[in-house]
Image: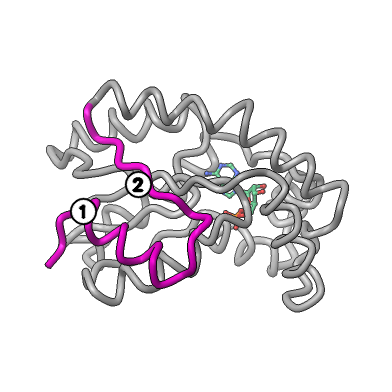
Amino acid sequence: MLIVFIGPPGAGKGTQCRRLVDSLRIPHLSTGEMLRAVMEQDTALSRYVASYINAGKLAPDHLVMRIVSQQLKSPQCERGALFDGFPRTMVQAQMLDDFLAELGRPLDAVLELRVNDEALIERLLKRAKTDGRADDNDATIRERLRVFHEQTKPLVQYYASQGKLRSVDGMQAEDAVFSDIRGALKLP
Ligand code: AMP
C-alpha cells in the first residue's frame, strides 16, 4: 500500500503516521527526518541542506526525490510505504507519479490533515519548547506556513482530480483524528 500524507507543519502528521504504520506494517518515509539525518553529518551536503531547512525553505526537489527513490527501491518498501511530508511541491508530485509509473506501483490514497493556521502556530511554538528543533522558531514557523500554502496546498487539488484525496479534520483530539483516518482508508 502506498499512501501520501499531506498537512501543514504542526498538523500532527508525524504522530498520526507513527500510529498508522504500526497498524499497516509499512515503513514510514519522512523526508523531514531523512533530511535532518543528513544534516547531522559534517559534510558540504549537510551544510547545503541546513541552509534550506534552518531558513524554513524547502530543500531542492531533485535532492529530495533522489533520497526518496533510493528508499522506495529498497526491500523494506516491498509492501508499500507511508510518505510523510513528501511530495511538497507540484514538481515532486509529478516526479513521484513518473517514478511510480516506472515501477508499476500507483499511489493508493492521499490523506490530507486539515488544521487552521492559528492552531498550528500555537502547537509549533509549544513544540519549540520541548523538541529543540532549529526550525521551530516564530519567524521560521511563519515562513514554513507561507511555503505550505504557496507550494504544497495546490497538491490537494492535484490529488482530488486523480480521485485519490481523503480529507480529515485535524482539529479533533488525537484518537478521533486516527479513527477518521482509519475510516478514510477503509481499514477495519
Ligand atoms: P518536516 O519534518 O516534514 O516538518 O520537514 C522539516 C523541513 O525539512 C521542511 O521545513 C523543509 O525544509 C524540509 N523538507 C521536508 N520534506 C521536504 C520535501 N518533501 N521537500 C523539500 N523540503 C522538505
Expressed as whole percent of the image width and height from the top left, the position of residue 44 reads 74, 53
Expressed as whole percent of the image width and height from the top left, the position of residue 163 reads 22, 28
Residue at the spot of label 2:
111
Badge 1: how crowded within 10 Å, few (<14), some, or many (20+)? some
Residue at the spot of label 1:
185
- The quadrant the N terminus occupies is bottom left
Query: Which region shows up in magenta?
Result: 163-188
Instruction: Give the structural element (helix, strand or loop) at label 2.
Output: strand
Is tag 1's residue or tag 2's residue first in the polypeptide sequence? 2
On whether ligand 1 comes within 8 Å of the CB at mark 2, the answer is no
* Residue 52 falls within the magenta-colored stretch: no
Q: Nearer the viewer, residue 67 or 139?
A: 139
Residue 15 as seen in the image, left or right of residue 37: left
Q: Nearer the viewer, residue 125 or 135?
A: 125
In the displayed structure, would residue 150 be above or below residue 132?
Answer: above
Badge 2: how crowded within 10 Å, few (<14), some, or many (20+)? many
Instruction: Give the structural element (helix, strand or loop) at label 1.
Output: loop
Marks 1/2 in contact by CB < 8 Å: the verdict is yes
* Residue 184 falls within the magenta-colored stretch: yes
